[in-house]
């Protein structure tokens, strides 16, 4: 068996183990983060059963999607969004996980083609309060969520975060717990959100223990990325 297939099985088992530790029967979706990976690697993951893929850079993603047109894949946009990219993103992705302002949500809504289902979106939260990071503060989530639900071509599915990096597991868990609390609070208000996207290669099991329903895994699946990704 090739390394990607072996790694995929290992991650699927890790996900199952983590879910079993929560004493719940939650379904957890694995997003294979294929940024900086080439088409043959993505094909290998697909052949091994992976269907959901995440990309950060628009131009890179569009090129790969073109070469992978023969496969039925679900594409998630997980990178920062500039206004001038919303048209292409709304046309070429099934999900956008990195919505962090109303202007972007509106542009995605307006550009979503009528022949496609509504764009599935998550609000990106900067849970660690890092100045350099995309995402909104937890206290701003409710207002943006309310605005997004008024946009007919978007469907709000939940929240996404990249926590502040830390070696301290307690501090990491606190960030995941804060996300979970916000997610639960929205649902208590009647939102029916089903997606809490948090956890990457190094911490996806912890994220699941803290309530993640979606994890985004790149290097643990495909191997280390080349040092530099094209920034497009
Ligand atoms: C790169 C990236 C990931 C995957 O990171 P790994 O550590 O390689 O698993 C997940 N989410 C986002 C938003 C990313 O940019």
Image (tube, rainbow, N blue to C red):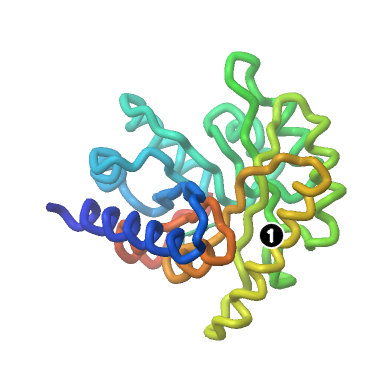
- Tag count: 1
| 158 relative to 92, above or below | below
| Pointer 1 local density, CA inside 10 Å: few below 14, some 14–19, many at least 20 | many
Q: Is residue 150 left or right of residue 197?
A: right
Q: In this view, does 2 lie to the left or right of 59?
A: left
**Residue at image coords 36%, 62%:** 14
Residue 210 picture location, percent across and down: 58, 65
Which residue corresponds to mark 1? 134
Q: In this view, does 191 lie to the left or right of 119?
A: right
User: Would residue 183 be seen by someone viewing this image from the given angle?
Assistant: yes
Res 193 quadrant in image: top right
User: Would residue 218 be seen by someone viewing this image from the given angle?
Assistant: no
Closest to the observer, 15 or 89: 15
Q: Residue furthest left?
A: 1
**Residue at image coords 73%, 54%:** 184
| 219 relative to 85, above or below | below
| 176 relative to 28, above or below | below
Closest to the observer, 43 or 10: 10
Residue 53 picture location, percent across and down: 43, 43
Residue 68 picture location, percent across and down: 33, 32
Kind of element beneath mark 1: loop
Residue 133 picture location, percent across and down: 67, 65
Q: Which residue lies furthest to the top in this view?
A: 115
Res 9 quadrant in image: bottom left
Q: Which residue lies furthest to the bottom in this view?
A: 168
**Residue at image coords 53%, 84%:** 167
Q: Does the residue labelled 1 lie within 8 Å of ligand 1?
A: no
Q: Residue furthest front?
A: 23
**Residue at image coords 37%, 28%:** 72
Q: Is residue 36 left or right of residue 9?
A: right
């Amino acid at each position: 068996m090739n390394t990607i297939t072996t790694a995929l099985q290992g991650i699927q088992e890790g996900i199952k183990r983590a879910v079993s530790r929560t004493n719940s029967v939650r379904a957890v979706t694995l997003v294979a983060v294929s940024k900086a990976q080439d088409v043959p690697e993505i094909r290998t993951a697909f052949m091994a059963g992976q269907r959901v893929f995440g990309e950060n850079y628009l131009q890179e993603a569009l090129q790969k999607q073109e070469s992978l047109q023969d496969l039925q894949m679900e594409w998630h946009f997980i990178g920062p969004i500039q206004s001038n990219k919303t048209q292409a993103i709304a046309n070429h992705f099934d999900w956008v996980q990195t919505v962090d302002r109303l202007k972007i949500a509106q542009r995605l809504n307006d550009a979503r083609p009528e022949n496609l289902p509504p764009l599935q979106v998550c609000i990106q939260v900067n849970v660690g309060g890092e100045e350099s990071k995309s995402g909104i503060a937890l206290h701003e989530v409710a207002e943006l969520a309310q605005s997004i639900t008024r946009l007919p071509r978007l469907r709000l599915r939940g929240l996404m975060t990249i926590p502040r990096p830390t070696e301290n597991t307690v501090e990491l868990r606190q960030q995941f717990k804060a996300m979970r609390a916000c997610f639960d609070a929205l649902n208590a208000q009647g939102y029916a959100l089903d997606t809490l996207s948090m956890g990457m290669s190094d911490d996806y099991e912890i994220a699941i223990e803290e309530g993640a329903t979606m994890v985004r895994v790149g290097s643990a699946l495909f191997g280390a990325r080349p040092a530099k990704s094209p920034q497009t």
